[in-house]
Image (spheres, rainbow, N blue to C red):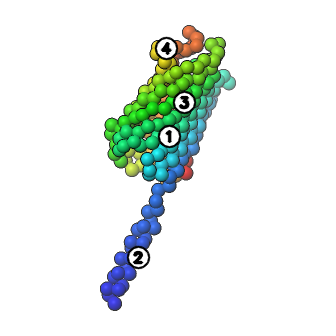
Amino acid sequence: MKRTTFAFLLTFIAASSFAADPPPKPWTSSIGAGLAITSGNTDTKNYNLAFATKYDPKTKFVFKADALYLRGDSNGETQVDKASADARGEYALSDRTFAFAEVSYLRDPFKGVNYLVAPLAGGGYRIIKSDVRNLTVDGALGVQMESNAGAGRSSGGAAKAGENFDWALSPTSKFTQKLTAIWKTNDFGDAFYHFDAGLTTAVASRLELKLAYVYDYKTKPPSIDIKKGDSAIFAALLFKF
């Protein structure tokens, strides 16, 4: 009788353990926003909207996409109005190498960029791969379609190099960093560089607070009156689902 009871308890504990750890969902997404308003000598309003999604069925294929919108107004005059988005599919060729195809989008009127779209395909290598830290580098070729204020539309070949790093500082905090460069193949002196870094920490089971820094640099803006580089620091509250 004791052996039967003991076996029953072991079976119940094992079943409870499996029930407590359901398989991870292939889709993970987050949406967030941040807002800052000041008044007095200067009235300012800054806000940001962010979205990210990832599909990882724990096979060789991974899809991920993200989008960011930044807007800033000072005394009724718009100072920042930037939108960017990326979508990418990766296929693992080995434990550390992968092939990918992606498309990126940028709209930044203050840089004279009505739109910049770059569909590309290439490969990459995972220099560091672990549950705590990951570092990847990649390269790709494709095309770039651009519309600039005053300069009109243009299109042609494009080459890209990129680097991504993430570090799980703790079970609830994570640091991420990304650096990319896109060159026009008919003029490598005409390039667009992007850098971003962010620190995310959980504040509740489905809520995260993110502090981020973004820097964009265009070597040949459409006008000499336009600065080549601009940066932004922002905070956002993210809802995970």
Asked which secondary structure carries label 1, the reply is strand
Q: Total of numbered circles in the picture?
A: 4
Badge 3 is on which residue?
119
- Residue type, label 3: Pro
Residue occupying the point 56% across, 9% down: 224
Q: Along the polypeptide, which appears first: circle 1 or circle 4?
A: 1
What whole-number distance in Å separates the C-alpha atoms at marks 2 and 1? 41 Å
Q: Which residue is mark 4?
A: 187
The disc, 4 or 2, on the residue closer to the chain's N-terminal end is 2
Q: Callout 4: few (<14), some (14-19), or many (20+) C-alpha neighbours within 10 Å?
A: few
Q: Which mark is residue 89?
A: 1
Q: Residues within 10 Å of mark 1 (few under 14, many from 20)?
A: some
Mark 3 → mark 2, Cα distance in angstroms? 53 Å
Please indicate, yes or no, whether residue 215 appears anywhere in the rendered image: no
Disc 3 and disc 4 in contact, CB within 8 angstroms: no
Q: Which element is circle 3 on?
A: strand
Distance Cα–Cα, label 1 vs label 4: 28 Å
Of the numbered discs 3 and 2, the one sitting upstream in the chain is 2
Q: Are marks 3 and 2 in contact (CB under 8 Å)?
A: no
Query: Disc 2 designates what residue?
Result: 12
How far apart are labels 3 and 4 at the CA level?
Answer: 18 Å
